[in-house]
Amino acid sequence: MKDELPLEKWLVAYRSPSSKRRPEGARFVRQFFAPGFYEAYDVVLTHAEKMNLEVLWFREKRNCGPYMNRNYPELEGLCTWCNRKFGDEPMPCAHGGCNAEFCSRDCMQEHQMRKH
């Protein structure tokens, strides 16, 4: 039986060089879970390569001082409607009291037409 390490919460800061809003690139922080440094490193670099992002830093959330008492969006979200993973900012359901998150307006509209 393998000894499994407990998952730690990690924060990563990225810069998107292809940002249309900011010429110097948009900077943002995301959170994710990983059992150790090397697993976290793998998650961070894999996501950066897939999304064409520059890694500014990453560390365990408990060692992040001013970043510790805030919740950040997950590194990859899962669309409530289509079940696809996405790395952008999630679109929350516009219907009050619904906690669904979507990858696009189309998915949000489909959800609203069929569920609300």
Image (tube, rainbow, N blue to C red):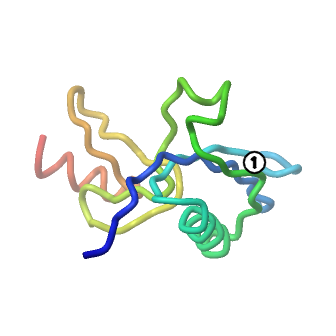
The number of callouts visible is: 1
User: Residue 38 placed where, x, y %?
Assistant: 60, 67
The residue under label 1 is which amino acid type?
A: Ala
Q: Quadrant of residue 65?
A: top right
Q: Residue at x 70, y 70 (%)?
A: 52
Q: Residue under circle 1?
A: 26
Q: Residue at x 55, y 48 (%)?
A: 10
Front-most of 113 and 80? 80
Q: Residue furthest right?
A: 24
Q: Is residue 83 above or below residue 115?
A: below
User: Residue 21 placed where, x, y %?
Assistant: 76, 46
User: Residue 103 placed where, x, y %?
Assistant: 40, 57
Q: Is residue 112 above or below residue 68?
A: below
Q: Residue at x 57, y 29 (%)?
A: 68
Q: Residues within 10 Å of mark 1 (few under 14, many from 20)?
A: some
Front-most of 100 and 55? 55
The reply, left or right, for residue 103 in relation to residue 18 is: left
Q: Quadrant of residue 97?
A: top left
Q: Of helix, strand and loop, which one carries label 1? A: strand
For the C terminus, the image quarter is top left
